[in-house]
Image: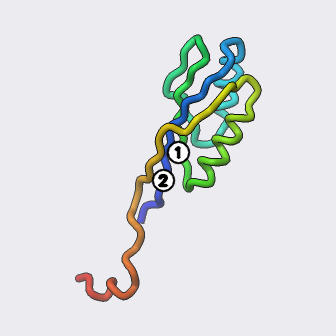
Amino acid sequence: MNATVHIASLLVHARAEAISQVERNLLAIDGAEIAHSDEQGRLIVTLETANEAEIVQALTDIQLLTGVVSASLVYHQTDGAPEAAPTSLQGDIK
């Protein structure tokens, strides 16, 4: 059975003069990837985590990075195996 994966997309706005450092710091976060960035300091960041709490923690960590003006959650979904069927129904499955 596969584990559930949480996938999130964030919009991060950084000061233009700090964009290189912000990008390095973002890539140091487990499960973070930069999907897009521009010279004005706008970045689209994706996160892949094991649970929602890790998304919240990563978002908080990103908001606190030097050079980051704002970071917002734009999208969240879960992917993976559905939860196991309740025990009372498992005996009926053939």
Q: Position of residue 44 (x, y in %)?
A: 52, 28
Residue that appears at 76% across and 26% down:
66
Residue type at the position of mark 2: Val
Q: Residue most toward the right?
A: 66
Q: CA distance from mark 2 to mark 1?
A: 7 Å
90 relative position to 12: left or right: left
In the picture, the disc for residue 5 is: 2
Q: Quadrant of residue 32?
A: top right
Q: Is residue 19 above or below residue 44?
A: above
Q: Picture coordinates of residue 65 (x, y %)?
A: 73, 31
Lower position in the chain sequence, tag 2 or tag 1: 2
Locate residue 75 relative to residue 94 in the image: left or right: right
Mark 2 burial class by Cα count in 10 Å: few <14, some 14-19, many 20+: some
Q: Residue at x 71, y 40 (%)?
A: 61
Q: Is residue 9 above or below residue 87?
A: above
Q: Residue at x 41, y 69 (%)?
A: 83
Where residue 26 is drawn, which disc sits there?
none
Contact, mark 2 vs mark 1 (Cβ under 8 Å)? yes
Location of the C terminus by quadrant is bottom left
The disc at residue 48 is 1
Q: Position of residue 28 (x, y in %)?
A: 67, 35
Helix, strand or loop at label 1? It is: strand
Q: Residue at x 56, y 24 (%)?
A: 43
Quadrant location of residue 38?
Answer: top right
